[in-house]
Amino acid sequence: MALFLALDQSTSATKALLFDAEGRALDREAREHRQHYPQPGWVEHDAEEIWENTLTVLSALLARHSDRRREFVSLSLTNQRETVVVFDRATGRPLHHAIVWQCRRGDPFCAGHAAAGREPLVRARTGLKLDAYFSASKLQWLVREHPDLRARLADGSALLGTIDTYLVYRLTAGRVFATDHTNASRTLLFDIARLRWDEELCALWEVPVRALPEVRESSAAFGTTTLGGVLSEPLPIRGVIGDSQASLLAQRCFAPGSAKVTFGTGSSLLLNIGGTPRFSAQGVLTALAWVHGGRPTYAFEGIVISSASTLVWLRDQLGLAPDVATLERLAAEVPDNGGVYLVPAFTGLGLPHWRPEARASLTGLSSHSDRRHVARAGFESIAYQIREALDAMRAEAGVPLGTLHADGGPTASRLLMQFTADLVGADLRVAGMADCSPLGAVFAAQLGLGLRRSFADFGPAASPETGYSPRLPAETSARLLRGWQAAVRQVLVPPAN
């Protein structure tokens, strides 16, 4: 029986999974890594720690299945997308902490380019907003603040890339320096229509083109690995794709109009719009869903910056509960939010507001409020943000939304899933497994290896889905949404002096 290894390198952890040919997850191993906050609004990861965790989780999984090594077909990789690493060409070791997608240190550079009127150029080439969420401003900060790194990137002794690029380089002992289209397209350096690095954008952000990786299709070959000698025979690396696009693939959203939401640290909504890029004037992003056989597929994307991270904040920073499951039980003990709204703008707000300067707010508290209402407000905040993002995407696409597919760890919360269905006003189909992103990477590998001839070869999901239909009266949903919008307005409008 063919077995497929997959590595899922996310914002909070590195996970190794083992799949069979039909997409059933057979085993899993995970290691969390530390979050570094050098100052407010800055977020970093230790890329060397991520590499060590990568070896640990893959080795542990292989050890448990050592009697089946000959059945392993390939290793696939999916990853947090906009996070960037600068590393040494000779050793592959990072030369600075990875700067994470949540990090806002690039805000001044984005503001400067916006003031100079460069936003239309950036949007027309990349489909994205001129925002520090994406990679380029992080890189501009690095080269401005670290002249030694600027010099090394210019002379070729240092390289840069998103997490997939870095891990492929380490896994292949420096033999392959490459990324895929989905990750390249998240940097603000890539032309999504011409499918290549854009020299004008690279000059704008002060990034040497020579320091950027080769761009390949997700299903292409990315070399082989022995995991630093763990394997006696090299294993092909096939299926490299950004985590949100990977889940779109796993959810079988192949047709224009199909959509999914991935609940994670943040949440990403993707709506397939077909083979021609379309650009929004309302803040909706245009993303490369994938490129296969030389043909691109595009999607509209909505970004929710604080999703599951809000629940972690309530657990750790406020100490409302020892774990998220207990937090959900607290939230379920009250029939509604009691007028309490949490706007989790810890590092700004995404679509449709795109206000990086916004900060979180807890409103509507009364003498009747207790920690149960605050917990419920945290869960509900995720659904409100998804509703706002989806409204913007639906209006831009001009297509009705039938069913919304969902995946990610927080989908285990029945309270959150039901409230999301109520707020969105559409059926929600939750994947039978939370880890759709690594499954999507395996699907890309199967296409590349010729084990699937086309998207039509992917049948129904191996694990049964769970369905949620709207139950809340429309007038109640509308009233709750109005309360949320009023709370958001308080965050967006500066207080009077």
Image: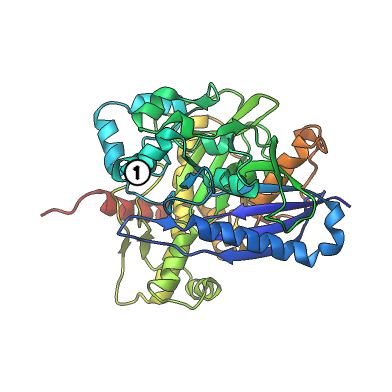
Furthest toward the right, the residue is 1
Q: Is residue 268 visible?
A: yes
Residue 15 left/right relative to 286: right
Q: Position of residue 175 (x, y in %)?
A: 63, 40
The picture places residue 329, in percent across and down from the top left corner, at 53, 75
Q: Is 338 displayed left or right of 435 in the figure?
A: left
Q: Element type at marker 1? A: helix
Q: Residue at x 30, y 43 (%)?
A: 107
Amino acid type of the residue that numbered disc 1 sits on in the rendered structure: Asp
Above or below residue 197? Residue 352 is below
Task: Report whether residue 426 is seen.
Answer: no
Residue at x 45% of width, y 72% of height: 315
Q: Nearer the viewer, residue 288 or 412?
A: 288
Residue 149 vertical position relative to residue 51 in the rendered view, above or below: above
Q: How is the image coloured?
A: rainbow
**In the orientation shown, which residue stands out farthest toward the left?**
497
Residue 289: percent from the left, percent from the top? 59, 35
* Residue situated in front as seen by the camera: 374 or 59: 59
Percent x, y of residue 139? 38, 41
- The quadrant the C terminus occupies is bottom left
Q: Which residue is mark 1?
A: 148
